[in-house]
Image (tube, rainbow, N blue to C red):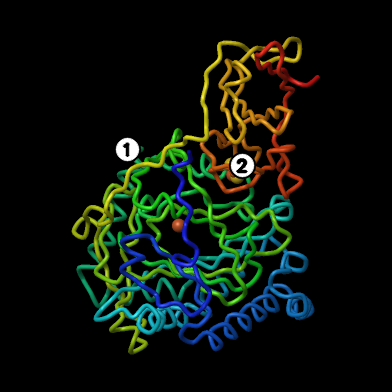
Amino acid sequence: MSEIREVEKADMLTTAKPEVDVPAILSEGAYYILDDYALRAEMYAKVVTAFLDGVAQLESASCAKKVEEGGLGQLHKHFPVEKIHLLESFLHNRLRNDLYYWSYKVGRENLDLKGTFYLDHLIMLRIHYPFLVAREAGEVIDPPYPLTERLGLAISALKNWRLLGHYFKKRKDKKLAEKNKTIAYDAISYHGNLPVPARAHAAHVDTWYGHSYDGVNLWWSIQGVNEDNTVILYPDMFGQKVDYNPVSMYLAEGIPVTRPVKVAMKPGQLLVFNPETLHGTQVNISDETRVAITTRLNPHTPRFNSDAPFNFEHWYSSDDLAKKKFSKISVFPAKKHHGEPSIVERPAIKAERTVKIKCAGRLSADEAVEVCQAADLRAGEKMSVTLENAKVLLWRDGDEIRAYSRICPHLGVDLEDGYHDDAQIFCPGHGIAYALRDGSSKCAAFKLRQFKAYEEGGALYLQKNN
Ligand code: FES
Ligand SMILES: [Fe+2]
């Protein structure tokens, strides 16, 4: 029997004006989609206007007109993918103070945070083109680091000499770590050789990347957020301690991943979740551009995992944001503000619906290899067969046996520990769903390689197709 617990949708996810229970977000990984929240109409209109202004300035007024008519979800049809970072930077410069203030209002009015709380200096504008368009990107133009941002940090530093000292120390520490090669992360291991606009975020928890413990993420859907390109949550793994590979920053191998919740959102809906819930973003296999904005609140003084290669130490306090005072940035050095997660650890979920076997043979087109007794492959269970030269997934489909390569054609993650139901298996990397009937996905670029599999004399055989 499966140990995988079905999330009670009514408890965990609602679109009907929920009472946001922040303690439940922090201690149980509850999450919410809000329809109603502070400044919704005003902020949404500001974002759309800024978007169209950015497109007009960076491309042309006629392009902006087409985007306005088709909607932001159709941006990829009109606006060059190579200019995406310029557009993100334009939006960031135009909107960031409004976004800080808006996040403060949501924290105070909708999350009902009391006293002083904090808002991360980092705001992410997330514009993701459909994969088939993004993978064709030429050289992406990067904007200069925004002058206003630099100026803001410099002014904050001048007002706070300890902060200035901290910057120099961090720079020195980083250079030392680079010299001693103690920074392990490698972007190619994480993203492969894909062009920057085609990238997605593998399943992770934010503290791996130096974000604070006990945070609350605001993930705001602007347009085009559908189930084939959205944020993916793994709520059933909340509280489970999971290891990761510090070079690729992927989940370590051998950890079964539970049912992915792909949160499709209407324009303007706001997802509120705990970033210590395992989560990622789906590689965009839809035909819409995903436009989203994310910010982060901390109900208390931020604390960090000081083992992370870097930390996000710059924050605004709610007291300053209440007065729209954007020039004052508080810094919480991880060396001083560190600690352990406050979440009560939960036992790991067992992958009882997966049978794993190792087999001494080789997979070839010339001759079939016997892998196990046919009865070992039961309906509803997937079998992961590791041969000398191949990793294979077996599935019983009525009277037929289906056999596929376990290597995801996106970025090579092994499907062995992916969640499956009776029709599909989800890659634990970036969430692509593959049909167990034929190995196909919703995107022409991604299909599992299929092998020949059959029963004979009570045994199960595998062979490469010619
Ligand atoms: S979806 Fe990215 S590696 Fe499978
Ligand atoms: Fe994240």
Task: Mark 1: give few (<14), some (14-19) or many (20+) Cα within 10 Å.
Answer: few
Is the residue 374 above or below the residue 334 in the image?
above
**Quarter occupied by residue 405:** top right
Is the residue 9 above or below the residue 102 in the image?
above
Percent coordinates x, y for residue 306 in the rendering: 26, 51
Is the residue 95 above or below the residue 26 in the image?
below
SS at circle 2: strand
Residue designated by label 1: 180
Identified at 65% across, 14% down, the residue is 459
Is residue 333 toward the left or the right of residue 420 in the image? left
Cα–Cα span, label 1 and label 2: 41 Å
Identified at 61% across, 70% down, the residue is 87
Name the quarter showing ligand 2. Answer: bottom left
Viewer-side label of 1, 2: 2
Nearest the camera: 420 or 111? 420
Is residue 203 toward the left or the right of residue 402 in the image? left
Identified at 33% across, 56% down, the residue is 311
Identified at 36% across, 65% down, the residue is 25
Residue designated by label 2: 425
